[in-house]
Amino acid sequence: MAAQSAPPAAAPEPGLRARKKQRTRDALIEAAHRLFLGQGFASTTVDEIASAVDVSQRTFFRYFANKDEVALAVLAEAEDHFIELLRARPAEEGPLRALRAAIVGSWRERGSAHPTGPCSVNAALELIRMIEDTPTLLAAHLRRVAEQERVVIRVLAEREGLDPAEDLRPAVLAAAFGAVLRAAHLSWTADQEDVGPEGMIALIDRHLDQLGPALVGDWRSTR
């Protein structure tokens, strides 16, 4: 009879110092978002953000290089988490199905982890709207989106066993998917206060359902 293997060891919990640093970082992000959404990005100073958490400007700059970085922090973390979920999707799923499942999982987890407050789904969507209206933030955000798109291309190519330099399908799908997501995000308006994660998922699904008809359908016959 074969000996049973021992269960994998649980990942060690972060130490006290690491937990304190994470709490400070989270508090700075929440304070920054509250101030940005309450009084505008341009009107908010680094000193105000630091004071709201009762830390110094020097402490702020240990965590973030500038206001742009703290403004984009939550979205950057959400984008990284989306990539993790995409990598974890079952190998038998088709590329578009894997992308849809990963983005739905990402929004649901955000809604569960942050049902209210500056990091909630509604606050994230308000932040996206603010980014779109702030040229410096939009430029930084679009650079980040371009970087993420390159990662998505690599992940899709790896999943399908393709060379993205020779096969253009991963690049085309990544570009189309990213554009549909942006359209879905921009279709949200601030008066949709009860959107929550499921409301956002419904918006995304509605837009993705139109991807095929928009690309290959006869638009005139469906008017």
Image: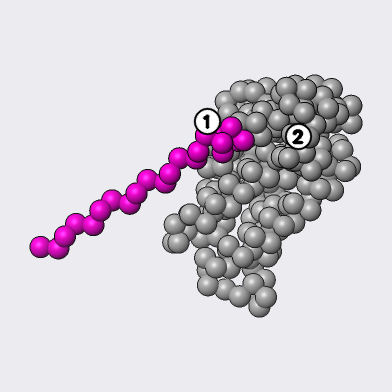
Q: Quadrant of the C terminus?
A: top right
- Magenta region: which residues? 1-22
Question: Which of 150/223 is in front?
Answer: 150
SS category of the residue bearing label 2: helix
| Chief SS of the magenta region | loop
Compute the Cα span from label 1 to label 2: 28 Å
- On the image, the x and y values in percent for residue 22 come to 60, 35
One can see residue 85 in this view = yes
Q: Is residue 205 magenta?
A: no
> Is residue 25 positioned above or below 142 on the image?
above
User: Which residue, given by chain and number where applicable, does mark 1 sit on?
Assistant: 112
- Name which residue lies at 84% across and 22% down: 39
- Name which residue lies at 59% across and 32% down: 20
One can see residue 129 in this view = no
Instruction: Give left or right: position of 136 versus 167.
Output: right
For badge 2, the amino acid type reads Phe
User: Which residue, given by chain and number where applicable, does mark 2 sit on?
Assistant: 60
SS category of the residue bearing label 1: helix
Quarter of the image where one finds residue 68: top right
